[in-house]
Amino acid sequence: MKLTYFQCKILNFGDDLNAYVWPRLLEEGFFDEDERELFIGIGSILYDSYPREALKIVVGSGYGGYTGPPNVHDGSWELAFVRGPRTADILKIPREKVITDGAVLLRAVELPQPAPETPVIFIPHFQSLDRGNWQETCALAGIRFVDPSSNVETVLSEIQGARLVITESMHGAIVADALRTPWVAVTPIAKIHRFKWTDWAESLEIPLRAHALFPSTTREAWSALSGGQGAGRRSRSFDRSVVARPFNLALKHAAARSLQRLAEQEPQLSADTTIARATERAVAAVEAVRLRHLKSENLMPDGAHSPGAA
């Protein structure tokens, strides 16, 4: 069974949580490189492009709108649980399959030590590392910048050590919520990234309040105005030009003030009982997948029972 998640040239701790969480929950040797079975875990990775002949085992994933919805009724999918009710509705599956994002399982594994206490941290979306100037903006605002392309242990430590997390990264909020650090959501610049926030928030009965954040560069401003991701060559070239320098300086200062205002907003957090129940259900769902896999491979430990056995 192959552990399957989104990977690109720019590291993103939200996706890399897969390599942190699952090996700590499942025994050594559970995963291999056999693509006949795909373990589809944390992320908006319910695509329509997986091989038809592979068995797709979904454990906490969500639909993000990056491809058309997959046909999960074609006999090649096993749905342990999905991220949110909007994913369930799009896939036309019962809402009983909804628990929450798989990253809630951080509550069931050992975590790194918290970083020294910090009043406020900011985690941008990983795509904002290129189009924005958030490290310098955070320094101006007096807010600690957390790089979403850092290794998972570093980001987890920073979130645990913070009293407040401001985050454009959805998994910044998901992890903060799981670890009980209050958070303030920033509306992602690219509209395509917004659906998944609501999907997750509704799974934990959170009335999501996402706030606009002033852009920190001309390239980011263009992304916000155009509704795109700011990857065009023209926006990059202008952003780095001499002409753009005074505009970028003004934007950086405006963005710093915007961050400071967000730090004064009322933060959000799911109810303790809700997150505890979601964790309990997710752990049980993973254990059911584990036992089914061991049984299919004739690796059931002595005295173990398959799910539902008396």
Image: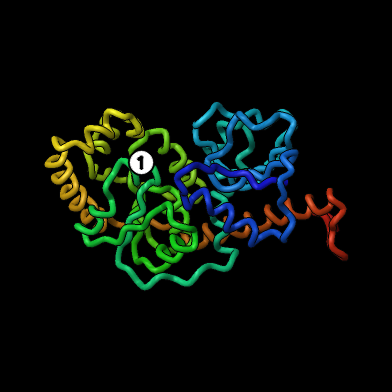
Q: Which residue is mark 1?
A: 188
Judged from this view, the residue extending furthest toward the front is 242
Residue at the location (60% across, 40% down)?
95
Q: Mark 1: which amino acid?
A: Pro
Q: Position of residue 223 (x, y in %)?
A: 29, 33
Residue at the location (40% across, 46% down)?
126
Query: Where does the C terminus fall, quadrant-wise?
Result: bottom right
Q: Position of residue 132 (x, y in %)?
A: 28, 44
Left or right placement of residue 200 versus residue 163 in this view = right
Name the image quarter holding residue 118.
Answer: bottom left
Residue at the location (71% across, 46% down)?
33
- For mark 1, give the secondary structure: loop
Left or right placement of residue 277 versus residue 159 in this view = right
Q: Position of residue 93 (x, y in %)?
A: 63, 35
Left or right placement of residue 35 versus residue 10 in this view = right
Left or right placement of residue 161 versus residue 55 in this view = left
Along the line of sight, which residue is nearer the eye, 280 or 115? 115
Q: How many marks?
A: 1
Along the line of sight, which residue is nearer the eye, 199 or 296? 296
How did the renderer colour the structure? rainbow
Neighbor class of circle 1 (other Cα within 10 Å; few <14, some 14-19, many 20+) is: many
Q: Position of residue 87 (x, y in %)?
A: 55, 37
Name the image quarter holding residue 63.
Answer: top right
Residue at the location (35% across, 72% down)?
117
Vertical order, 34 against 135 (above or below): above
